[in-house]
Image (cartoon, helix red, strand yellow):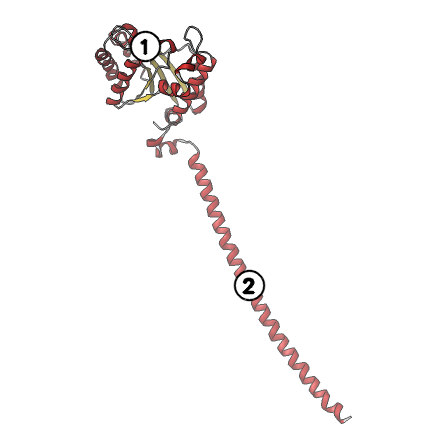
Amino acid sequence: MKKSFILIPLLLIATIVTIVFGQRYSARQREEMDGNLVSFAEDHEGVSEETLETGNDAEEDGASSHKNLEYYEEHSESLTLYEFLDFLSLKNGEVSLAYYGDIDSEEAWVNELNTMIADSISGDFNVMNHTYPEYDSYELYIQQTTQAVIKDSPDVIIYGMPALPDKIRDIGLAETEEFMSYVLDSLLIQEKTELLLLDPYPVPNEINQFNSRSLDYQSYLGRMQSLAEEKDITVLPLHSAFLNEASENSLAAYFDDNDDLNDEGTHQIVTILDTFFNEEL
């Protein structure tokens, strides 16, 4: 009985101690849990902000890739030809392109190119026909063919270089350079007009066919390209690009018996020009 009186207080004290230490332990656990929650919230908040910033960056990148007027103005020194045309169409509500020189506007590739340009711009697209198929450099100069082009004041001129007509006329290379210089200088007067020179596509039956001066049409084309380089005028090298896609022996596959382009030849020209129009000016 005496032992029971002794044990009861001891058990009571042990119980009290256990309760006290248990409460302190619980308090410490709550503090640690609260600290973990705060830490998790801080970490979560940081990740959210970073993700939001990344999202904004992505939106900004997306906006910069959208070809609007502001974008074109900021990147005006590195525009492709398609972008340049679209830029002008947005800026002025329309853009005009004139074909000039030795280009047959009835050939299918011209219409297909016009369609691709129209699809790539935002404003109206006006095509001006100032072509003179089979006119040589002398005829283009002496007949003052540039006057009508200058009067229309197009935004872009694509000048088909008359290499084959000059060869057929049998004029000297110095004369070709002289007459073509007159034509180019008159077109370059229009400072707001972008002048592009277009090589002729290859003509299978005319390659290595020489005139009385021992010159074929490629000889005249070479002199015209050199003149363009001297005057710092962009040349669309259709001739060499076409030849690179097909050896001279297989050129016949792109033409009919009259040396006119067939469907495959038309597709080849359109593909090459589309590539040029996607390159920086």
Q: Residue at x 72, y 88 (%)?
A: 7
Q: Is residue 139 left or right of residue 87?
A: left
Residue 229: horizontal and vertical position, in percent? 26, 22
Residue 138, position as x, y percentages in the image: 25, 8
Q: Is residue 270 left or right of residue 160?
A: right
Residue drawn at x 76%, y 94% is 2
Specify few, some or many for label 2: CA neighbours under 10 Å numbering under 14, 14-19, or 20 or more: few
Q: Residue at x 51, y 51 (%)?
A: 48
**Residue topped by disc 1:** 164
Q: Residue furthest right?
A: 1
The nearer-to-camera label among 1 and 2 is 1
Where, by quadrant of the figure, is residue 226 drawn?
top left
Q: Is residue 162 visible?
A: no
Could you say which is closer to the camera, residue 137 or residue 55? 137
Which amino acid, by three-letter code, is at mark 2?
A: Asn
Specify the amino acid type for callout 1. Leu
In the displayed structure, 105 sits above or below 27; it is: above
Where's residue 231, x and y in %?
Answer: 24, 22
Q: How far is mark 1 from mark 2, CA to CA?
A: 84 Å
Residue 45 shown left or right of residue 147 in the figure: right
Residue 36 is tagged as 2
* SS at mark 1 in the image: helix
